[in-house]
Image (cartoon, helix red, strand yellow):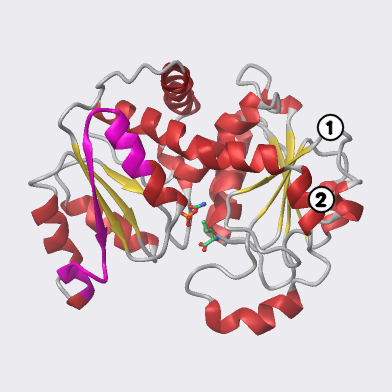
């Protein structure tokens, strides 16, 4: 049995297998073919934080695969009233076939997985958001920005907070061998442990990784530009300070003009215009961004089928 806790646990080959399944199932879905790959499978979805995309994509995804999804908000289940995580894991995993959990610390996810009898999927933690990166990878492939056979042809720039999305992009690049420039303001750099893991992975994959505090340097001549909110869930109290500290990090036309002419802009959403991205850049790339959002559905269907095969 495998869990999907972070991309570090997966090889390039395994990531490719998941994406291939996603591509195949997306094609079938678009042709109106709904094969019951996970007939009668129950997916429990535990949310300790808000969600639009993750909730809808997992619930629709499992239904389209012939199974059923249970939305469990921590506000409604006993977990929110102090029932231990390990008891919740032992109870739920005796009744369902797959569990997705969105929580705070990665250690909560790891503890849950330790006590679960069935595969556990990370639906976002403070440390990383790996299901988002499966969708992002699928989107890069569809927009001709990534090829498993030629990963070094791609250079991405992540510009913004050194958060769960930054960590996930860095891990993916270092695993697959595409290049990535990461620009964060001083004091918002990425986690040192993640950095070390990525630099190690890059020795095998050949990915070139650059860290800087200058967005202009990071974005120069890249193929893919990525950002994320400056204020993640749980950081609401720091909003005022963060908005000041991130000045100069907005992805606007001026900054985008430094990337390659045919570069794409990606965002996991929700997006805050006038902060991490300007309205015009957002709307210019809306087809990429909403394909990326839709691909959450397809990528996660590939993942769920892969985990249960
Ligand atoms: N991108 C993403 O995970 O969105 P939600 O928070 O709406 O699930
Ligand atoms: N970094 C954001 C991602 C939201 C999908 C957060 O954790 O809130």
Residue 301 sits above or below residue 133 on the image:
above
Within the image, what quadrant is residue 261 found in? Answer: top right
Disc sitting over residue 218 in the figure = 2
Q: Nearer the viewer, mark 2 or mark 1?
A: 1
The crowding category of the residue bearing disc 2, from other C-alpha atoms within 10 Å (few below 14, some 14 to 19, many at least 20), is many
Does the residue tagged 1 have its C-beta within 8 Å of any atom of ligand 1?
no
Q: Is residue 41 left or right of residue 277?
A: left
The reply to whether discs 2 and 1 touch (Cβ–Cβ < 8 Å) is: no
Q: Earlier in the sequence, mark 2 or mark 1?
A: 2
Q: Quadrant of the C terminus?
A: top left
Viewer-nearest residue: 53 or 120: 53
Rounded to the nearest angstrom, the CA distance separating label 2 from label 1 is 16 Å
Q: Residue 234 placed where, x, y %?
A: 47, 74
Viewer-nearest residue: 116 or 50: 50
The answer to whether residue 4 of the structure is visible from this angle is: no
Q: Is residue 41 left or right of residue 28?
A: left
């Amino acid at each position: 049995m495998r869990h999907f806790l972070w991309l570090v646990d997966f090889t390039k080959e395994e990531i490719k297998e998941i994406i291939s399944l996603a591509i195949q199932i997306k094609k079938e879905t678009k042709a109106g073919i709904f094969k019951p790959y996970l007939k009668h499978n129950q997916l429990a979805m535990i949310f300790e934080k808000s969600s639009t995309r993750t909730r809808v994509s997992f619930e629709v995804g499992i239904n389209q695969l012939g199974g059923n999804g249970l939305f469990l908000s921590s506000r409604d289940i006993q977990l929110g009233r102090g029932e231990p995580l390990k008891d919740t894991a032992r109870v739920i995993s005796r009744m369902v076939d797959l569990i997705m959990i969105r929580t705070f610390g990665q250690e909560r996810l790891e503890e849950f997985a330790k006590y679960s009898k069935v595969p556990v999927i990370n639906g976002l933690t403070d440390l990383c958001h790996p299901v988002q990166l499966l969708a992002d990878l699928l989107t890069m492939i569809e927009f001709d920005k990534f090829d498993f056979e030629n990963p070094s042809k791609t250079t991405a720039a992540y510009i913004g907070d050194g958060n769960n999305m930054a960590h996930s992009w860095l891990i993916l690049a270092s695993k697959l061998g595409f290049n990535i420039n990461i620009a964060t303001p001083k004091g918002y750099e990425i986690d040192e442990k993640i950095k070390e893991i990525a630099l190690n992975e890059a020795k095998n994959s050949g990915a070139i990784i650059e860290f800087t505090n200058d967005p202009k340097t990071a974005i120069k001549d890249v193929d893919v530009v990525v950002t994320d909110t400056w204020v993640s869930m749980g950081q609401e109290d720091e909003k005022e300070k963060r908005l000041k500290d991130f000045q100069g990090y907005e992805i606007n036309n001026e900054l985008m003009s430094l990337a390659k002419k045919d570069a794409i802009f990606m965002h996991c959403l929700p997006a805050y215009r006038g902060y991490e991205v300007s309205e015009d850049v957002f709307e210019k790339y809306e087809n990429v961004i909403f394909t990326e959002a839709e691909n959450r559905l397809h990528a996660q269907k590939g993942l769920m089928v892969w985990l249960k095969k």
